[in-house]
Image: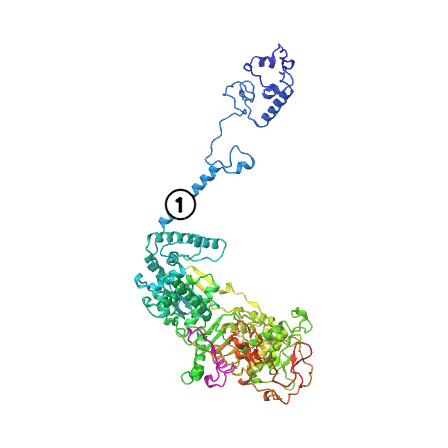
Amino acid sequence: MSEHRRKTPQPQGGGRAAARRGQPGPPEGRRAAPRGATESPSDSYGSGGEERPYGGRAEARRAAQRGSSSSGGRRRSADGAGRGGPGGGGGRRGGPEGPNGPGRGRGRSGPPAKKRIIDYPRAGKYGVGRWVPSWKLVTGLFIGFCGSLVAVAGIAYAMVSVPKVADTATAQNNVYYWADGSEMVATGGETNRQIINYDQIPEAMRYAVISQENKTFENDSGIDPKGIARAFYNMAKGGQTQGGSTITQQYVKNAMLDDQSQTISRKFKELFVAIKVGATVKKEDIMAGYLNSAYFGRGAYGIQAGARAYFNKDAIKLNPSECAFLAAMLKGATYYDPAGATEVDTAATAKANTKRATIQWKDTLDKEVEYGHLSAAKRATYKELPKWQNPRSNTQLSGQIGYLVDLAKGYIINNTKITASELQQGGYSIHTTFDKKKVDALTKAVDKVRKANIKPKLRPKTDKYVQFGGASVNPATGAIEAIYGGEDATKHFTNNADQTGAQVGSTFKPFVLAAAMSWGVRNPDGDPVQAQDERTIVSPKSLYSGKNKLKIEDYDGTIWTDKNGNEWRQKNDGQQSYNPPSYKIDLREAMRESVNSAYVQLGMDVGLDKVKEAVLDAGILQSSLASANYPSFSLGTSSPSAIRMAGAYATFAASGKQNDPYSVKEITSKDGTVFRHREVAKPKEAFTAEVADNVTDVLKTVVEKGTGTNAQLTGREVAGKTGTTDGNKSAWFVGYTPQLSTAIGMYRMDDDETSKNREFLQMYGTGGEKTIHGASFPSQIWRDYMEQALKGEKAVDFPTPTDIGKVLNDTPSPSATPSPTASATESATPTPTPSESVTSPSPSTSETCGNFGWSCSDTGGTSTGGTSTGSTDGGVTATPTETTTSTTRGNGNGGIFGGSSG
């Protein structure tokens, strides 16, 4: 044995050393644990015997490290649980077995750790590994999750029941009330449905639906997983929900009318019902259930009601063309019914719907041929939509009631949280803004003019198809108090008070004046887009040219031309020039006599973008506007509805405060009040009071001594404007008092709304008149109606306007002498006296729309600026017919005049 391992002699005395010597030593062959590692009480003292030496410095270091680790966190035991000491046993170096049993490998005592069902966070792991689940845990959880889904699906499948079509045939009435609270009509509960058997449904109808909606219907399980996933994804991202993808799912959706909410829980319920229906119900019964519950529009539920609503025949008698038509209605009758539904959406016009329905109808027939359900020879015989009938049959909706109800429905669907489906189910009390006295008075005023002047049997070429439309709006609130939609809602189903496509003509000129007073004319030396401080606000005393065939200039004095280089020469009504030889006319007189040339040039000086902004601010809808890229925009090539025109003029009557027209004040149900208009009403300032009151003051002169004298009321101030389109295709009078604004329109259009090529017709000779102007029948109806509508109400005067703007072009211009070759109307003639003959038309087909038809809704004129081959289309001539020199700018302040003779 080396010197380092030799034990030193032990002292013979007592004390702790003696006590230690009396304890059992390590077993033979094993070295005792170093004293520093035993945690015995003597470790803390520096005396009391000598320590046993370690087997070298390295061993001593290891022992010291083990002792330090043990003292930092290991459980201490008074009965010898230490490392390698007496009774501790089983230390790292291996001590004897103590009284508590054999020693543990790391010297840790106590009971073993309990096992967990889910070992997470993982025991015995440290750091990131502690949080990474084991493959056993992942597998177990996946199996458990799948099992839970199967259990839930099984329970859900067992709980749902197969719906019955007969249970969906119930509905309640909606009750509509007049503004005074009295009942107008109860409608909606008469849901039009008649259930028929499968063998009464024509084979062509079944194949039309299968070909268009679900070509695998006869073999599929009834659900479309992709469609379901798409619907859930759409809802999850907050998008619009989608309907069922298969006929089975559509049937289930139609049958579950007790809950029409578009929620995930409802979609799950529909899914399980569809699975159960697909597994337990025969395909024939599913098809019959679907076609007996589907909504075809016009209040018709089921194929039998749909066949009656559109073709007035039993379903079994439908031919393949009619079946394909009805299949198109299933896409959404609002946008596919050729009769139109502008009361719900202004985009759902008769023309647009007819186009959509035709495309869908053709596609259905073609698919039937492709899938072998229809022969190509039979398909070739169907070239146009089948002839359909009037959409209204409920006699309760006759007269104006049907138009009023449709208007209120449209407002509800577009402005409240009530959906079309919920409204159809009924149960609502709907309080409208319609004043029964005013509605009756407007109807009587129209009937009076019609009976006295319109004789379709006597003058079929000129008096047939004449239509009137009108609306009254309260300036203070925007409430629609009366409309005239046509002779009878059950006979003529286009609401003439709503958007019809008829241009409004010179009734647009007040918006040009309002824009000139609000933003001013542009500096001719500046850029096209100029800040307000670069512009000059216009006074109604400003002078512009009243010359016929005026060569229109851009704001900077350059001659305006279209993209083909054609100039624009603006004509006045009757080829009339005003105030020769200078042709100067102030804006008040130009409004009074409806002089086109002056207001077209004013619009160019202000900027047609600003004119458009004024129109929109007043309350006209963007969707009804023609393009603002042509000078004719200022002359009313747009086609707003009578309701919107009355509402826009009401903005002037309210000193610039604009309120959107509305028709429903309040809606209640069994759950209480569900809508109040006053809670969502948001009036805004379209124009300053200074601007609006000056426009009103100018429009007063139109009625006092201009083209609107026919609209004068007894003891009341009236402001208004006539409007006529060349070709006599429409005529308007829009006017107001401080309490009520009313628009009356008149036009001719083929009343066969099943026709594909409907167009506005000329009114030369209509009513025995040589021409029709806004100053004739429209203003007469306006006057007769307003006298009765305001009867008993106190007369109120308009506010007195303050001076506004700068008088432009008031300096003398070069002397202008008519050319010896000028036409009679171009010679020096006195200003014409106010009469219908001087009412100014706005350009129509021949005047502004060239070869593109009457509407101009797509181009706002023509793509050639109004000319094609040197004609006078669009108020333009490629070669001037007058021998006077072309016009020149005035004093550079934004106006123009007729130039000197040459």
Residue 885 counted in the magenta span:
no
Q: Amino acid at mark 1?
A: Val
- Dominant secondary structure, magenta: loop
Instruction: Compare residues 464 and 15 and report the one nearer the observer.
Output: 464
Tell me where residue 250 sits by quadrant: bottom left
Kind of element beneath mark 1: helix
Q: Residue furthest top?
A: 12
> What is the span of residues highlighted in magenta in the rendered image?
752-780
Residue 873 appearing in the image: yes
Q: Is residue 602 above or below residue 411?
A: below
Q: Is residue 421 above or below residue 581?
A: above
Q: Residue at x 68, y 71 (%)?
A: 526
Residue 764 counted in the magenta span:
yes
Q: Is residue 779 above or below residue 248?
A: below
The residue labelled by disc 1 is: 150
Tell me where residue 631 sits by quadrant: bottom right
Instruction: Compare residues 190 and 454 and report the one nearer the observer.
Output: 454
